[in-house]
Image (cartoon, helix red, strand yellow):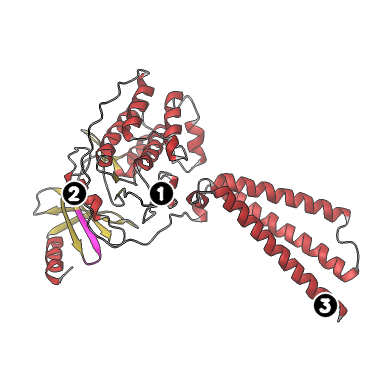
Amino acid sequence: MDDDQTLRSMVRDDAYRVVRMLGDGASGRTELVTFNGDGLLVRKHIPAALANAAAWAVAMEVDEPLLPRIEELYRMPDELVVVYDYVEGEAVNEVVEQEGRLEVSRAVGMLVDVCRAVSALHERDVVHRDITPSNVILASDGAHLVDLGIARQKRQGQRRDTTTLGTWGFAAPEQYGFMQTDARSDVYALGRLLGYALTGEKPDTEAYETALSDRSIVPEALYDVVQKATAFEPSARYQTAGELARAVQEALTGVPLPEPVAAPAPEAAPQPAHPQAPIRRASRSFMEAPLYLRALAALAWIALVVGFLIVLAASVTYWLTNDPIWHAEQYTMAVVVDAGIAYLCFEIYKAVCLRGAYATEPHPLRLFIARICIYCLIIFLVMMALGIFVSYLREG
């Protein structure tokens, strides 16, 4: 940006009066503002490294009442600023926190509205990537999808997204870096959104799985829809938001809906040049993990340390006294500990790897086994080195 552009943007930015802060996170700062007292607007400041001006430019041209109408788009020296209409209503997460899970018909109606909004973006090859309960506003005229802060356009030939931001529990596995996101990634988030609305539980908790499997809470037909929409493999999901909307309506009514007539997709808007953003890997801290997972991890470390100490004690005893390496008691204890470590590792893999960091890899099991083998090799080499050192001291 040259000095004149910067000055004009700063003057324009100062013309808005901030009413209150709506949110401040990794994807930007969001404020409720007014301009000359003419009504409420939302202003979002997106860091330049994360801003996808192409997606916002396309969104400005989308004529869909359930998407935010963008009033203004301008650049500041280190960020992109977007101003769009404020939607009066309550976010889905606020309603659930106050009233509990949504009635089945209300949850389905909400999802159908959001699918309609998402479909309008997908027609322009824009992927929202952050469909969460806090970004869906229940208003008098339907459910509005807001905040395109980390939206991006699908690019032919690109293997993965440039940025890997997303909301844990709602973002699709591929959103964490091992392939490019597309419409099916938003379908995954839509399935999680439906599951959250039906159960009133966050998808990354044990309570969510329990409630989702309870037929008195979630009808079997809707359970099947959620499971298909949130399949780990993108090809196993509904391929479009429209397909998901029809499936959820059919599940509610039990009446098949006619297939819509496909309309030719409009040409995608040209993408303006902008610097690539650094890869940011989504993560969660240890204390944010479920209690059972933290306990399991602690037990695994305890078993690992105990097993190491047993092997170390047996080896040092042999080196110092020339007694057999394993007495019966030591051998039995070592077998039990090793079996426990193997079982705990397997459980941790099921609980963490398929839903956590290993989900960013195309071959998670292969990587998991490789890391375990490398770790065991390191322990073996350390024990060998310690044995040689002790033998040297004895002979010396």
Q: Secondary structure at mark 2?
A: strand
* Circle number at residue 5: none
Figure quadrant of the N terminus: bottom left
Residue on which the image places disc 3: 392
| Residue range of the region highlighted in magenta in the rendering | 77-82
Picture residue at 77% right of the left edge, 49% below the top: 336
Picture residue at 31% right of the left edge, 48% below the top: 154
Residue type at mark 2: give it: Tyr
Where in the figure is residue 372, as x and y percent of width and height? 64, 55
Residue on which the image places disc 2: 84
**Front one among 7 and 38:** 7
Residue type at mark 1: give it: Gln
Picture residue at 42% right of the left edge, 44% below the top: 172
Q: Secondary structure at mark 3?
A: helix
Residue type at mark 3: give it: Tyr
Figure quadrant of the C terminus: bottom right
Question: Label 3, label 2: how many angstroms apart (C-alpha)?
Answer: 75 Å
In primary-sequence order, the first of circles 3 and 1 is 1
Q: Secondary structure at mark 1?
A: helix
In primary-sequence order, the first of circles 3 and 2 is 2
- Check whether the beta carbons of the residues at disc 3 and disc 2 lie within 8 A of each other: no
In primary-sequence order, the first of circles 1 and 2 is 2
Q: What secondary structure prevails in the magenta region?
A: strand
Where in the figure is residue 152, as x and y percent of width and height? 30, 50
Residue on which the image places disc 1: 175
Residue sticking out furthest to the front:
157
Mark in front: 3 vs 2: 3
Residue 87 lies in magenta, yes or no? no
Q: Is residue 302 left or right of residue 318?
A: left
Confirm whether residue 291 shows in the render. no
